[in-house]
């Protein structure tokens, strides 16, 4: 029963909680604990259109702009709900084992690319202040980004603020070639721009590369594609970028399109073995759940 409850919690990644607009809690399989999400894209707009994305972009958005005072108020309330245990009174959190009830991070994520938010830097500052005010300075701030806007001054200033305390920057890279990038991420942002941005930021801010691999129309990425992906990681390193590790994972939740399905454990293991052989980088695996 405990395993069933945990799987349900992992599968439930709705970017909403009761009447909150911007702040939501999840049990994250990658964080291995409670992650408090900061949704800076309540309008559900994104400059990627990933084939595996589960965000419902058809139903109307609850709001369109990020109101910093409201975000601040919501985060204070959410962290107090976590601290006093109220969060774990209702499902899907009630069935979560005590070992996974620790607060691992506050993550800038949500229904789109957080760095496209015009008030990104202000949002980072607001979250920083709340974390400090509540005595949670050991809690990591995590930025989950596709890299498209890492060249913007405001974004870099926000990252510098995040860097001043415990932090992790997770940079998405799902492909080794432009062709596969356009197949999976389906973005108008050029692939070379993504690589350039990640490499430039990684020179002064160590990153964790997060990579989701899957079956597209029943086909997993072949060895040639994974070889090209490993070559891109090596190029970032050769340009002076610091990669702390690689998160290799597959889909855990149903995508909006049936073309996208998760890899088997064996398929993900083979990718990991090839990446390790070609790069020598440390990696962490996160398997999917049966659809």
Image (spheres, helix red, strand yellow):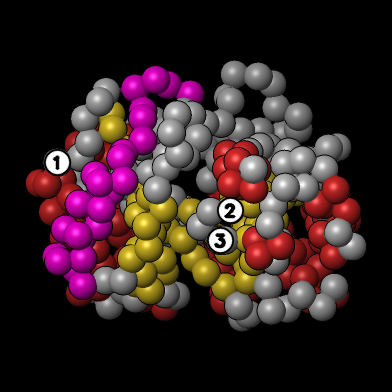
Quarter of the view holding residue 234 = bottom left
Q: Is residue 100 left or right of residue 30?
A: right
Residue found at x 14% / y 65%: 278
Any part of residue 104 in sight = yes
Q: Which of the pair 66/170 is nearer the observer? A: 170
Spot occupied by residue 198 in the image (x, y as percentages of width and height): 36, 62
Q: Is residue 258 left or right of residue 282?
A: right
Residue found at x 27% / y 23%: 217
Give the number of the disc on residue 151.
Answer: none
Residue 236 among magenta residues = no
Question: Rounded to the nearest whole Å, what is the CA distance between mark 3 and mark 1?
Answer: 28 Å
Question: Rounded to the nearest whole Å, what is the CA distance between mark 1 and mark 2?
Answer: 28 Å
Q: Which of the pair 243/10 is nearer the observer? A: 10
- The residue under label 2 is 28
CB under 8 Å between callouts 3 and 2?
Answer: yes
Q: Quadrant of the N terminus?
A: top right
Give the number of the disc on residue 222.
Answer: 1
Any part of residue 74 in sight = no
Spot occupied by residue 263 in the image (x, y as percentages of width and height): 31, 39
Q: Is residue 226 above or below residue 33?
A: above
Q: Is residue 55 left or right of residue 213?
A: right
Residue 272 among magenta residues = yes
- The residue under label 3 is 31
Q: Is residue 62 above or below residue 196?
A: above
Question: Rounded to the nearest whole Å, what is the CA distance between mark 3 and mark 2?
Answer: 5 Å
How many numbered marks, from 0 up?
3
Q: Does dot 3 land on a helix, a strand or a loop?
A: loop
Start and end of the magenta stretch?
A: 256-280
Residue found at x 82% / y 52%: 87
Q: Does dot 2 land on a helix, a strand or a loop?
A: strand
How would you classify the magenta stretch by its main secondary structure?
Answer: helix
């Amino acid at each position: 029963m405990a395993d069933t409850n945990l799987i349900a919690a992992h599968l439930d990644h709705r970017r909403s909680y009761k009447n909150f607009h911007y702040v939501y809690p999840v049990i994250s399989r990658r964080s291995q604990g409670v992650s408090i999400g900061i949704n800076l894209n309540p309008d559900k707009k994104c400059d990627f259109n990933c084939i595996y994305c589960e965000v419902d972009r058809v139903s109307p958005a609850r709001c369109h702009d990020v109101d910093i005072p409201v975000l601040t108020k919501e985060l204070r309330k959410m962290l107090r709900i976590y601290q006093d245990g109220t969060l774990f009174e209702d499902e899907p959190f009630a069935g979560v084992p005590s070992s996974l009830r620790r607060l691992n991070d506050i993550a800038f994520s949500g229904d789109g690319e957080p760095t496209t938010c015009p008030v990104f830097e202000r949002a980072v500052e607001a979250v920083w202040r709340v974390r400090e005010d509540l005595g949670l300075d050991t809690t990591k701030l995590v930025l989950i980004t596709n890299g498209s806007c890492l060249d913007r001054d405001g974004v870099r200033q926000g990252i510098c603020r995040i860097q001043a305390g415990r932090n992790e920057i997770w940079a998405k890279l799902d492909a080794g070639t432009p062709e596969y990038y356009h197949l999976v991420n389906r973005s108008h942002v050029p692939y070379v721009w993504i690589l350039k941005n990640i490499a430039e930021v990684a020179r002064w801010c160590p990153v964790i590369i997060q990579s989701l691999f899957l079956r597209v129309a029943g086909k997993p990425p072949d060895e040639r594609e994974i070889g090209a992906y490993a070559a891109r990681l090596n190029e970032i390193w050769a340009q002076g970028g610091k990669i702390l590790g690689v998160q290799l994972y597959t889909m855990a939740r149903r995508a909006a399109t049936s073309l996208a399905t998760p890899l088997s454990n064996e398929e993900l293991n083979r990718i990991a073995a090839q990446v390790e052989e070609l790069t020598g980088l440390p990696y962490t695996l996160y398997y999917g759940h049966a659809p």
